[in-house]
Image (spheres, rainbow, N blue to C red):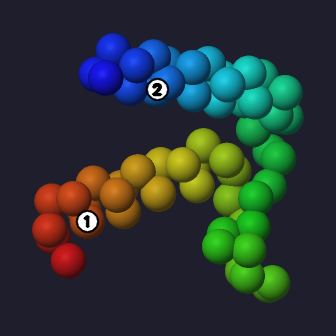
Amino acid sequence: MIDIHNHKISLQGRDTARRNERAPRNRNHKYWVLGVPGSWNVCRDDAVSALLTIDIALNSKLF
């Protein structure tokens, strides 16, 4: 079962990579933060960095 589980994770990773290849490579492409109208928009890289920071903080029980 562990091997099957790992295989599914690797397949999911490849699908994600393929999706990212189709995504705009322009760093100036904007994303709405939390989809809130009128919210500040950021570059995708910055949004991902912010989400990772929040995720690490939550996992570390800083909040």
Residue 63 lies, with reference to residue 22, above or below; the image says below
Ranked by sequence position, the earlier of labels 1 and 2 is 2
Judged from this view, the residue extending furthest toward the left is: 61
Find residue 59 and report its image quarter.
bottom left
Q: Quadrant of the N terminus?
A: top left
Side of 31 relative to 24 (left or right): left
Query: How busy is the neighbourhood of tag 1: few (under 14 within 10 Å), some, or many (20 plus)?
Result: few
Q: Which of 14/46 is in front?
A: 14
Residue 24 lies, with reference to residue 44, above or below; the image says above
- Horizontal and vertical percent for residue 49? 47, 49
User: Which residue lies under the disc numbered 2?
Assistant: 9
Residue 9 lies, with reference to residue 51, above or below; the image says above
Give me the residue at 27% from left, 54% from top.
56
Give me the residue at 80% from left, 55% from top.
30
Would residue 14 be visible to someone looking at this image? Answer: yes
- Horizontal and vertical percent for residue 54? 36, 62
Judged from this view, the residue extending furthest toward the front is: 1
Disc 2 residue type? Ile
Q: Quadrant of the C terminus?
A: bottom left
The reply to whether dot 1 and dot 2 touch (C-beta < 8 Å) is: no
Query: How busy is the neighbourhood of tag 2: few (under 14 within 10 Å), some, or many (20 plus)?
Result: few
Give me the residue at 58% from left, 55% from top.
47
Give me the residue at 41% from left, 51% from top.
52
Find residue 55 and report its image quarter.
bottom left
Circle 1 sits in a helix, a strand or a loop, which is it? Answer: helix
Side of 60 relative to 16 (left or right): left
Circle 2 sits in a helix, a strand or a loop, which is it? Answer: helix
User: Which residue lies under the disc numbered 1?
Assistant: 58
Q: CA distance from mark 1 to mark 2?
A: 23 Å
- Horizontal and vertical percent for residue 44? 67, 47
